[in-house]
Image (tube, rainbow, N blue to C red):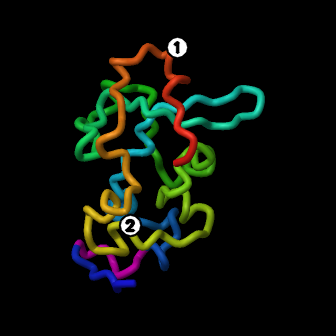
């Protein structure tokens, strides 16, 4: 495994030393690997609370870059979009993708080698096939009552 360089001045391997609650806003934001999985619409079984991810992406997700087209003002367009923080991660982690850095660190697990903080390359998440790049369907093209036809089995 390549030893990452602290290019952004956040502290070398800060995620291994700094508890989520103590991270600076820049460190917190740097945890996002840019996979876009959290922007997939999900279905939750009310009886089992099981979460099913769909290929149906939030209308603000850019399917090529896997980034939110309006991240800083996303709540104006998508009020139900979650603003993840160290204070609310305990209520939200259960529905986040199993590969998500926020969830992994919350659960006391290490980041994957393909995570950009570890690899030093933002493209590594896509190269490893861990992003939604190129395979989502915009939510405005699929009626909500048809989302179940777009459930993906493994994420």
Instruction: Indicate the position of residue 28 as horizontal and vertical percent values.
Output: 39, 60
Instruction: Indicate the position of residue 25 as horizontal and vertical percent values.
Output: 35, 59
Mark 2: few, some, or many residues within 10 Å (few <14, many ≥20)? many
Q: Does the magenta segment cover residue 111?
A: no
Q: Residue 145 carries which label?
A: 1
Residue 88 in the image: above or below residue 50:
below
Q: Which residue matches tag 2?
A: 115
Residue 53 in the image: above or below residue 132:
above
Q: Please identify the dominant SS of the magenta region.
A: loop
Q: Does the magenta segment cover residue 11?
A: yes
Instruction: Indicate the position of residue 11 as horizontal and vertical percent values.
Output: 34, 79
* SS at mark 2 in the image: loop
Q: Nearer the viewer, residue 7 or 21?
A: 7
Residue drawn at (25%, 38%) of the image? 62
Residue drawn at (61%, 69%) of the image? 108
Q: How far apart are marks 1 and 2 (CA)?
A: 34 Å
Residue drawn at (32%, 81%) of the image? 4
The answer to which of marks 1 and 2 sits earlier in the sequence is 2
Q: Which region is colored magenta?
A: 8-14
Query: Looking at the image, how many numbered discs can be counted on the residues?
Result: 2
């Amino acid at each position: 495994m390549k030893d990452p360089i602290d290019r952004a001045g956040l502290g070398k391997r800060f995620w291994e030393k700094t508890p989520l609650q103590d991270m600076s806003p820049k460190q917190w934001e740097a945890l996002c690997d840019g996979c876009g999985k959290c922007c997939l619409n999900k279905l939750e079984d009310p009886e089992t609370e099981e979460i099913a991810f769909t290929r149906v992406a939030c209308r603000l997700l850019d399917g090529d870059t896997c980034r939110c087209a309006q991240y800083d003002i996303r709540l104006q367009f998508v009020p139900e979009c979650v603003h993840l923080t160290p204070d609310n991660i305990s209520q939200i982690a259960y529905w986040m993708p199993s590969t998500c850095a926020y969830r992994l660190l919350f659960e006391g697990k290490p980041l994957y080698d393909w995570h950009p903080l570890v690899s030093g390359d933002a493209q590594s998440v896509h190269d490893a096939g861990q992003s939604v790049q190129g395979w989502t369907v915009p939510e405005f093209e699929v009626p909500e009552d048809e989302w179940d036809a777009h459930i993906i089995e493994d994420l």
